[in-house]
């Protein structure tokens, strides 16, 4: 089964990317409330941020159609290190065995399953920064990939600013496209070796980069967009001000850019939030769900999602009806990374164990019944000793 293995960069380094962390990680460093409002209700529940209380329910035109050349590959999840083309897959992989702090860009051909470094230089050793495929972590601290209109896009740190760079499919050309934001860096006084940098989540969709800027202990966060291949300033689409608010899981589908928000109480242990969508055609924000979701996808007029308790649901976006989806045999654990996507018309629920990194995929029919169950590893670095990629590469992949 064709698939490509992306970059897994978890390692004990000086710079920590918290931009795509789970809610628990973000809330662990909450600070004092400065909003001037109560963050908890009389019954102890968390009060929803004031900017979210009067947003209308979604009633827009159903238009979540994916267009290959221009649309984000949202079902790959947040800040993915791989993208699919019509003929194969590009992936960023950390050079653990090369004694160099860098990621390398690879291409895997769908027909032959051959995997090669993306370098146009003849006689290149592919072992240092002179290689087209080499992306030094000091300059490219976010090893993510996006594709748009026949080119790849990556985030580069130029001084204190995060910029988007366009990269040709052969790796030979890297050119600045636009500027996102100034990097938010927090130095840890108690440990001179520890520096935390808060990187945004982002998706490139229909000519724009959509991104957020929350970080642990912040009092405001926003959803922005900036036009590709321009010198324009980012446009603020939505802002919320509260106690440690955050905006994450940015996933565009068709004309809509969907995102989740939440805000915490002063303990940092309880929070309220939901899912919202930005209409790229009329600029309005509307409400999709009052659940804090741990994985979702949209197909036709239905939102499929996993809630915080591990339940799988389907919401009809035309009628607002929410129903449980899936069999009881579908075991969704709290300690799993959760991903939903469609493959050949069937919903795939992908659950990856945090410790073993073994991924279990359940393929469901239109009624939520389990058609098949697959197991494998998303990244070659996770494969146990003694097993080859061929032994475990049985997983399905979106956009293939």
Image (cartoon, grey):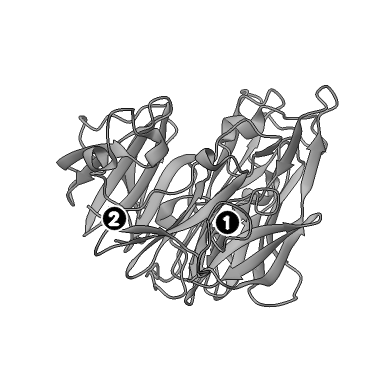
Nearer to me, 125 or 185: 125
Name the residue rendered at 80%, 37% in the picture: 186
Q: Where 368 sits versus 25, above or below?
A: below
Position of residue 97 in the picture relative to residue 245 (left or right): left
Q: Earlier in the sequence, mark 1 or mark 2?
A: 1
Snapshot quadrant of residue 74: bottom left
Q: Residue furthest front?
A: 123
Q: Which residue is mark 2?
A: 342
Name the residue rendered at 81%, 54% in the picture: 160
Q: Residues within 10 Å of mark 2 (few under 14, many from 20)?
A: some
Nearer to me, 68 or 138: 138
Residue 321, horizontal then vertical, whole percent: 33, 50
Q: Where 164 sits versus 367, above or below?
A: below
Q: Residues within 10 Å of mark 1 (few under 14, many from 20)?
A: many
Position of residue 282 in the picture relative to residue 224 (left or right): left
Name the residue rendered at 73%, 30% in the picture: 30
Q: Which mark is residue 116?
A: none
- The total number of labels drawn is 2
Q: Residue furthest left?
A: 371
Snapshot quadrant of residue 195: top right
Residue 222, horizontal then vertical, whole percent: 69, 54
> Element under label 2?
strand
Position of residue 166 in the picture relative to residue 254 (left or right): right
Q: Which mark is residue 134?
A: 1
């Amino acid at each position: 089964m064709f698939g490509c293995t992306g970059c897994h960069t978890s390692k004990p380094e000086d710079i920590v990317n918290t931009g795509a962390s789970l809610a628990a990680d973000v809330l662990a460093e909450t600070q004092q409330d400065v909003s001037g409002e109560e963050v908890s209700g009389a019954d102890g529940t968390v009060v929803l941020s004031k900017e979210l209380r009067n947003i209308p329910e979604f009633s827009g035109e159903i238009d979540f159609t994916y267009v290959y050349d221009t649309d984000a590959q949202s079902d790959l999840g947040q800040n993915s290190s791989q993208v699919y083309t019509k003929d194969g897959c590009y992936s960023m992989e950390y050079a653990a065995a090369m004694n160099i702090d860098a990621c390398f860009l690879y291409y895997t051909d769908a027909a032959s399953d051959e995997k090669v470094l993306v370098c146009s230089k003849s006689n290149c050793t592919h072992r240092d920064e002179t290689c087209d495929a080499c992306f030094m972590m000091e300059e490219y601290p976010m090893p993510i990939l996006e594709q748009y209109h026949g080119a790849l896009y990556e985030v580069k740190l130029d001084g204190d600013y995060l910029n988007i760079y366009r990269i040709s499919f052969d790796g030979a050309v890297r050119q600045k496209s636009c500027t996102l934001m100034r990097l938010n860096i927090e130095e840890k006084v108690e440990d001179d070796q520890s520096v935390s940098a808060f990187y945004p989540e982002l998706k490139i969709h229909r000519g724009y980069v959509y991104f957020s800027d929350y970080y642990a202990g912040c009092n405001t966060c926003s959803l922005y967009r900036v036009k590709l291949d321009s010198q324009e300033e980012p446009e603020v689409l939505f802002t919320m001000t509260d106690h440690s608010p955050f905006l994450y899981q940015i996933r565009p589908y068709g004309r809509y850019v969907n995102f989740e928000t939440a805000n915490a109480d002063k303990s940092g242990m309880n929070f309220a939030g939901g899912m919202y969508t930005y209409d790229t055609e009329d600029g309005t924000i509307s409400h999709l769900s009052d659940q804090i979701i741990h994985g979702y996808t949209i197909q036709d007029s239905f939102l499929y999602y996993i809630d915080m308790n591990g339940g799988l649901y389907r919401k009809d976006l035309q009628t607002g009806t929410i129903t449980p989806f899936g069999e009881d045999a579908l075991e969704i654990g709290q300690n799993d990374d959760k991903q939903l996507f469609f493959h050949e018309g069937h919903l795939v629920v992908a659950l990856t164990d945090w410790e073993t990194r073994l991924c279990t995929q359940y393929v469901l029919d239109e009624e939520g019944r389990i058609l098949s169950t697959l197991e494998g590893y998303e990244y070659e670095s996770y494969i146990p000793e003694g097993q080859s990629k061929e032994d475990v590469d049985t997983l399905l992949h979106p956009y293939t």
